[in-house]
Amino acid sequence: MDDYLFRQYVNECRVVYEETKYVEIFNYSDPFHNSCEEHILTPDEFENFLHRRGAFAPPELRPGTSLLSGIRLVVQTDAQDKDTFMPKVLSLPKDVYEQMVRVLRLPFRGIETTSVVGPFFWSSYDHDDADPHLHIVHRKSDVRKKGRTRGWEMMLSHSFATGVTTGFVKGTPSSDIVAALRHLRACAAQAGHPLLLPTIILAHDLAPANDQKQRDARDWLRRLEHAVSMRDEIEVGEQYFQNGQLEVDGLNRDLVECHSNVLWKRPQAYMALTGEMEKAMGLFKDMHEATAASKNRGRESEEEAAARDKERRELHRLHRSMLARMDFYKVKLTGLENYIHTTLQRLKVQREALYNIMSQREARLNLEIAGEQRRIAHASKRDSTAMKTISLLGTLFLPGTFLASVFSMTFFNFQSSAGPVISDKLWVYFLLTIPITAAIVGIWIWYDKRKEAQYAQDDEDLEKDITKMELDIMMNLRKRTMSKNHTWNTISPPPR
């Protein structure tokens, strides 16, 4: 089943090109033959490396010398293709990748983890009783950043019969693979433990820089708290205050960015990973002790037996040291998780406080808009008085027109058959028209002044109503968000 699934997944993958190297470390009972090499691995030499032929053939050993431990890796430390860690993507030709997995006895399930984001760690026996191997898959990849995928991966297979670990390791320039391999070469004498390289990778992942990033996030949070609460600790040149005003948009963006920094490398994921690594160490110890007693029994010289015993004691000491390191990381991650939890809770409080400030500002803006609309309505009402001017013009001519019409009736005759053309009774017309017109104009002026005074009083009352309404709403908002009854313990009064 595993073989069929492996071939199926390989056929579904597409291939990108990455530069390939190899790393070989061998430890012998005679230190004279010990070797540690890292070189470019060309395509024409790839098969020779897998089968240890040609330039990669084992050296001729002195009599009484045997191989104690070693590690052989195909590495791609500078993966540059932007899709190199995308799901269903291989960085070796399909036939070469399949040959590598089969010859080096790597886990078939490694091809099924191309879409895992990690951190991911898995270990198991290969269930070959004749030549047992411990399989390990350890990887971490992430979504694209600036158009490129990021991460690293390793597949390891440790032979309990030979003590040699084979594997495939790949990483992008932003990963710690280069530093981890440099660390591995420095610990070449301890290369017999298959969990050495995964532990080195974990040590780089949980380096003090991770703790420092959380400390920086807490310091950033403290400055955000000062800005939101407007404490006295705010510096004069603080970036969140421009011209004495709180810059809400920048503050909100920084709250989001600070939150994302706090969530970087969550301790829960690494707690689970350390648990899986402890499980793998248990698998290695059980099988190593079961096979060590029968390995080369009765066929070793005294020098070989002494060297193997020394190597076994060193391996056991390293194993205990790595277990102690796992316990150390668990305690460290527990403390870091508590620290992060406190930071997240404080971020939540500041975000809610900022939302309240923004809500109050929006309420104030709505009040200002409503006030302006009411002012516009009153202004429109006053503008309607412009029509009164037209009515006034009609009013000025209306009395004279009315009286002229009346006196032109046949009931009045101011002309005599021998009299002048203009009647001497014309004064009667002006006597009546002028007083009536003046009275009408006077009444209109009195009425208009009275209305203007009423409009002025209405405007004053309107401004008072708007101010009172704004104060009432803001007071209700403050009662809901900043009530001391909910902030302070009612048993003891708040500090003054």
Image (spheres, grey):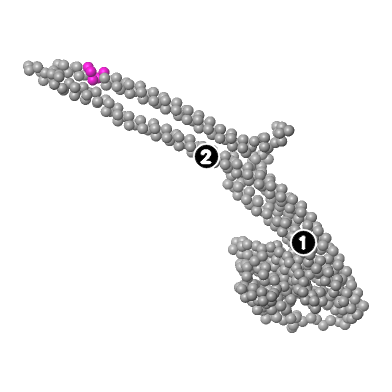
Between 212 and 136, the one lying in front of the other is: 136
The part of the chain drawn in magenta is: 431-435
* Quarter assignment of residue 117: bottom right
On the picture, is 376 further left or further right than 8?
left
Nearest the viewer among 204 and 479 is 479
- Which quadrant of the figure has residue 3? bottom right
301 magenta-colored: no
Badge 2 element: helix
Number of dots carrying numbers: 2
Q: Position of residue 483 (x, y in %)?
A: 64, 36
Residue under label 1, please give it. Answer: 275
Q: Nearer the viewer, residue 322 or 36?
A: 322
- Give the class, few, some or many, for how many residues have Cα within 10 Å of label 1's Cα (few <14, many ≥20): some
**Would residue 179 be seen by someone viewing this image from the given angle?**
no
Q: Please tell me which of labels 2 and 1 falls first in the chain.
A: 1
**Residue linked to disc 2:** 365
Quarter of the image for residue 436 reads top left
Q: Secondary structure at mark 1?
A: helix
Residue type at the position of mark 1: Gly
- The image shows residue 50 at horizontal and vertical percentages of 73, 79
Q: Position of residue 406 (x, y in %)?
A: 19, 22
Outermost residue, front side: 1
Give the CA separation, mark 2 to mark 1. 55 Å
Who's the residue at 69% across and 75% down the image?
1
Image point 70% across, 36% down: which residue? 488
Image quadrant occupied by the C terminus: top right
